[in-house]
Image: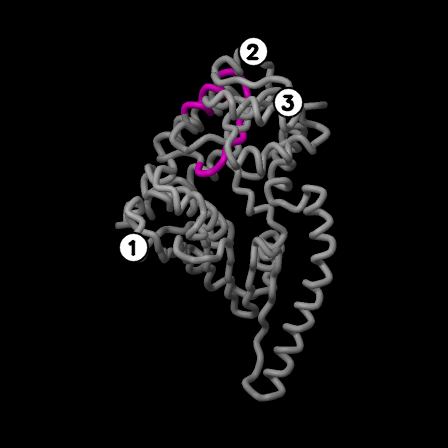
């Protein structure tokens, strides 16, 4: 069975992440691309050899017989577009954040249930191999009892989001952080149960007038540990890192580099430090070896977390199973984002 999909939004996330994945899947046909900027839709359709392009979303829904709609537009129109798609009987795959508030998320969930269609929010880093491995180590108890999880997200200071004051992210509640915090929030959520933000510290360190704050640190409490987030818009670096502390092991994750390093207890003697360094060297040697297969998969377009996530979503539709992230998961992510952004000054 081949599923027909239409993409709405022909910007960077669609062109760089979604379309390459969807076009590589044998069980998906990209039937149409829609963008209010018709030339963008037409250019994307030509580049990816998609038959039809539209500048009107309702027209695409009316003309095309679609199994699911992939929404890659700014968050402020996620709710209205997803409801329109679901009212048309389409399943929905939607970029994060799911909505700009819990009230919108609730409308989307209501429409999903009313029309008996799936609503899946793209939390792709949950399919990153190092996050999956870390979750396994936590769930099997290999790290001991979970104590603390810290997620760090760096948005490079010269990125489009940071450097362009007219970018739509700055008009979101909480500004740029409503756009970049969903990733660290759901990564902490996946490990620390029932997290609640307890304290948010924000600062403005740059001279970019369009950002109210550009540095944020969040402290969160949870049922089985403490969570934390550090987000920076001033670094020259761009990436995501997660540090997990357990009673037996500490884990250091680089999501972009696809590396996971285990730190085990050691004595402070010269021998203990030597053994620690030997363990580290062994792990780094294994990491060096794994980069060959990672590079091959990158060339084939199968190394991205988007590839793993979207292919799992498609499989969930074909197998009538639970999607990798549900609408309820997306709503909880938005709820926590709202609580954090209320405290950003």
Residue 320 image-quadrant placement: top right
Please tell me whether residue 93 belongs to the stretch shown in magenta. yes
Q: Residue at x 38, y 38 (%)?
A: 167
- Residue 315 x/y as whole percent: 66, 33
Kindly indicate whether the residue at mark 2 contacts the one at mark 1 (C-beta within 8 angstroms): no
Q: Which mark is residue 286?
A: none
Q: Taking 101 as reference, is 304 left or right?
A: right
60 up-or-down from 177: above or below: above
Identity of the residue drawn at 48% across and 57% down: 237
Kindly tell me whether residue 199 is visible in this rendering.
Answer: no
What span is in magenta?
A: 80-97
Residue 106 seen in render: yes
241 or 159: nearer the viewer: 159
In the rendered view, would you say 170 is above or below 236? above
Camera-nearest residue between 109 and 230: 230
Q: Residue at x 62, y 45 (%)?
A: 304
Please check the rendered image and state whether residue 142 is part of the magenta-colored stretch, yes or no.
Answer: no
Contact between marks 3 and 1 (CB within 8 A): the answer is: no
Q: Which residue is mark 1?
A: 204
| Residue matched to label 3 | 50
- Locate the N terminus and report the quarter of the image it occupies: top right
Of labels 1 and 2, earlier in sequence is 2
Relative placement, left or right, of 212 versus 220 is left
| Residue at mark 2 | 63
């Amino acid at each position: 069975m081949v599923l027909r999909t239409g993409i709405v939004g022909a910007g960077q996330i669609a062109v760089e992440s979604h379309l390459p994945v969807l076009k590589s899947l044998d069980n998906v046909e990209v039937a149409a691309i829609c963008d209010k900027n018709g030339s963008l839709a037409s250019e994307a359709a030509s580049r990816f050899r998609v038959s039809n392009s539209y500048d009107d979303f309702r027209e695409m829904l009316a003309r095309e017989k679609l199994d699911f709609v992939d929404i890659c537009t700014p968050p402020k129109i996620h709710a209205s577009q997803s409801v329109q798609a679901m009212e048309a009987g389409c399943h929905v795959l939607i970029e994060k954040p799911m909505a700009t508030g819990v009230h919108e998320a609730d409308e989307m969930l209501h429409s999903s249930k009313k029309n008996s269609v799936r609503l899946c929010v793209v939390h792709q880093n949950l399919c990153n191999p190092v996050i999956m491995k870390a979750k396994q180590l936590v769930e099997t108890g290999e790290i001991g009892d979970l104590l603390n999880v810290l997620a760090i997200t760096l948005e490079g200071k010269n990125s489009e989001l940071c450097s362009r004051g007219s970018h739509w992210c700055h008009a979101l509640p909480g500004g740029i952080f409503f756009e970049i915090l969903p990733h660290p929030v759901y990564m902490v959520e996946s490990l620390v149960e029932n997290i609640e933000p307890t304290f948010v510290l924000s600062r403005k360190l740059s001279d970019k007038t369009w950002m109210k704050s550009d540095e944020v640190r969040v402290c969160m409490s949870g049922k089985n540990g403490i969570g934390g987030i550090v987000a920076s818009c001033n670094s020259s670096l761009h990436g995501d890192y997660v540090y997990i502390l357990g009673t037996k092991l500490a884990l250091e994750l680089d999501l972009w580099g696809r590396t996971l390093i285990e730190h085990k207890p050691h004595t402070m003697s010269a021998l203990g430090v030597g053994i620690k360094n030997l363990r580290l060297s062994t792990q780094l040697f294994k990491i060096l070896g794994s980069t060959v297969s990672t590079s091959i998969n990158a060339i084939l377009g199968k190394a991205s977390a988007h590839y793993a996530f979207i292919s799992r979503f498609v499989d969930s539709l074909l197998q009538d199973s639970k999607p990798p992230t549900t609408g309820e998961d997306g709503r909880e992510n938005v709820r926590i984002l709202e609580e954090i952004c209320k405290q950003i000054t």
